[in-house]
Amino acid sequence: MKRTKYCGSFNERDIGQFVTVTGWVQTKRDMGGVIFVDLRDREGLLQVVFNAQNLSVTDFSAAERLKSEAVISVNGDIRQRDEETLNPRLKTGTIELTAKQIEIVSEAEPIPFSIEEGGKVREDLRLKYRYLDIRRPEMLNNLRCRHSVSKVIHEFLDDEGFIEVETPILTKSTPEGARDYLVPSRVHPGSFYALPQSPQIFKQLLMVGGIDKYYQIARCFRDEDLRADRQPEFTQVDLEMSFVDQEDILQHLEKLFKHIFKAIKGIEINEAFPRLTWSEAMDKYGSDKPDLRFDLPIIDVTELVRNCGFSVFSKEAGNGGVIRAINVKGCADLTRSTIDNITQKAISFGAKGMAWIAIKEDGEPYSVLTKYFSEEQMSDLLQAVDGKPGDFILFSADKYSTVCRTLGGLRLYLADMLKLRRADDYKLLFVTSFPQFEYSEEEKRYIATHHPFTMPYPEDIPYLISDPARVRSQAYDLVLNGIELGSGSIRIHKKDIQQKMFEALGFTPDEAKERFGFMIDAFQYGTPPHGGFAFGLDRLVMLMIGADSLRDIIAFPKIKDGSCVMTDAPSTVDQSQLEILGLNMTQGETGTVKSPTGKSLPSINMDNVASHSMFYLADDERTSIEREMQDIIAFAGQLSQADTADIPATCHIVNKENVFRPDLPKVTFTREELLENTPQKQDGYIFVPQIVE
């Protein structure tokens, strides 16, 4: 059965060779005495011809029985295709295999979707049968690209003197940032490991250990809400270096990413990556991860309109707010409905409305604002925004954060509307000097924008305690096409600065010792200046191949709720496993679910449920639905415990007079009569074949 080489690897140089090929049957065409099969493996397709004159009766009979996706092994000769059967769309379109012998290695049941048309199939179905979905050339190519990117990174960092070191997966929970995934310890009852959100602490300890240049392509875990570019478990390229400053790290990163794009995409990036401080990015683009594939800058006009007659602008400026604009070049002819859609989009971002000016081809501004501006004021305003005939200028007036969010969001919305964001255009930049802290309204304290070990700029250190809002961090992000690829920082290596940082975050010395004691201890024994960076491998590959979702470049991804539809993870576990771990049980000894009060809930007669709901329930469905119903009853028990004594009633009772029709039963049909014209029935029910997985 050993194959000569992959199906898609044969070419005209192999003509006349006796070979063995293996793979999956993609299509079969029976022409009567001659059968054509497209045989597929990971490298492509090869046409195999089964001719009754060249095969034994047994082998030709086997070829006749072939079904889609069966695995076969075929021996035969490679030959030139006839002129009329040439297929220029295939790499192997000029050759074919004349079969001499066939072995059916593995039969295949009818598959839930066609491999050839897999891209048109619902994603939930493809994910349920992901092992079939991976057979699609698109998925294979995505995974191959991911492998190539990983290989290029390994080779580059090895050549640059980095040492790959693995760090623990079972580690200590340090609740700063996203929620941890927790793992209970059997040996230490009541104690938990945390799965790492990143190798942050360990890579810094490796610098204390003298590794100097560390890297790892690490698996990381974060219990957070999912979206198209986020998964609960993800792969991160992690770097750390000693005796470096911010400039050293940015130069290393620029060199690495230029190498990746040249090796994978054949794109030579000669110019240096643009750099913006966090403040510059927010002011000019309304985002700390700006998309530079198009222009549409944000322009501050606060001082120009401070004393205008338009009260929305003048009042906002007087109250400390800002007024900013975007000039959408050549779009003065936008329809009213389009302008209304843009306005509604602005409102969805938090704006109260949207003022605008359309400049006619004769240079005359068309806007309600002309009633509130003198000719000189309007001329100065249009000059400030570079307004020319045919331009459309929109405005946002509010507090700084709202204006940034509104215009930053509109900038992307307009770019998509005008088709300015090409998937094959790649624009990278660095964003630096992030705020050291951000204020959490929920916790009523300042929290670290990046993490507690980020070094502030030296000139800002005196303000760590007295004025934390003004402190800038030596932190930096790498942004690609408006998406944050990764982030990093120079780390704190001095004990006194780290203590001030913990104090600014509201940690007492005991709390800091409890959470980060091992790290604080390590830093007492000679810590080099160090810094690092980490970026998402999944996200980088997604952007490089133009995929819509991380799920397209991960072999076995999770869906939006963090579950795996193929394996049904997460799932319940045996009671005995929970008992070994010393966890509180959700089920009693008999399997009866307990309410919040500790009382066992009665079992549910699922026969009655099935009868009243008029649905047929299979045995496995009965168990899961009973558990779900008991959970609902338990939750109702929790609600009944709530103290509502001081809460006013909000229900509204409608007078029921004349609202019910008289219930006059008519002659009913028997079950057999009701089911008489049903295409399929089972156990007295209408049977509907399962079409939604």
Image (cartoon, grey):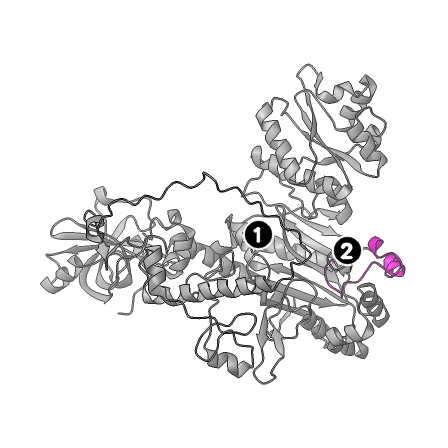
**Who is closer to the viewer here, 633 or 200?**
633
Q: Residues in magenta?
A: 449-471
Q: Position of residue 442 (x, y in %)?
A: 73, 57
Q: Residue at x 52, y 83 (%)?
A: 580
Element type where label 1 sits in the image: helix
Q: Position of residue 522 (x, y in %)?
A: 76, 78
Q: What amino acid does circle 2 point to?
A: Tyr
Q: Earlier in the sequence, mark 1 or mark 2?
A: 1
Q: Position of residue 460 (x, y in %)?
A: 86, 57
Q: Residue at x 14, y 52 (%)?
A: 34
Mark 2 crowdedness (10 Å alpha carbons): few <14, some 14-19, many ≥20: some
Can residue 256 be seen in this snapshot?
yes
**Who is closer to the viewer here, 632 or 344?**
632
Question: Is residue 332 rendered magenta in the image?
Answer: no
Position of 55 with respect to 383 (left or right) is left
Q: Residue at x 29, y 57 (%)?
A: 111
Whole-Å distance between the Cαs marked 1 and 2?
38 Å
Can residue 567 be seen in this snapshot?
no
Q: Eyeballing the image, is 352 above or below 373?
A: below
Mark 1 crowdedness (10 Å alpha carbons): few <14, some 14-19, many ≥20: some
Q: What amino acid does circle 1 point to?
A: Phe
Element type where label 2 sits in the image: strand
Count of marks overlaid on the render:
2
Q: Which mark is residue 261?
A: 1
Q: Eyeballing the image, is 32 above or below 591?
A: above
Q: Residue furthest bottom?
A: 187
Q: Which residue is mark 2?
A: 439
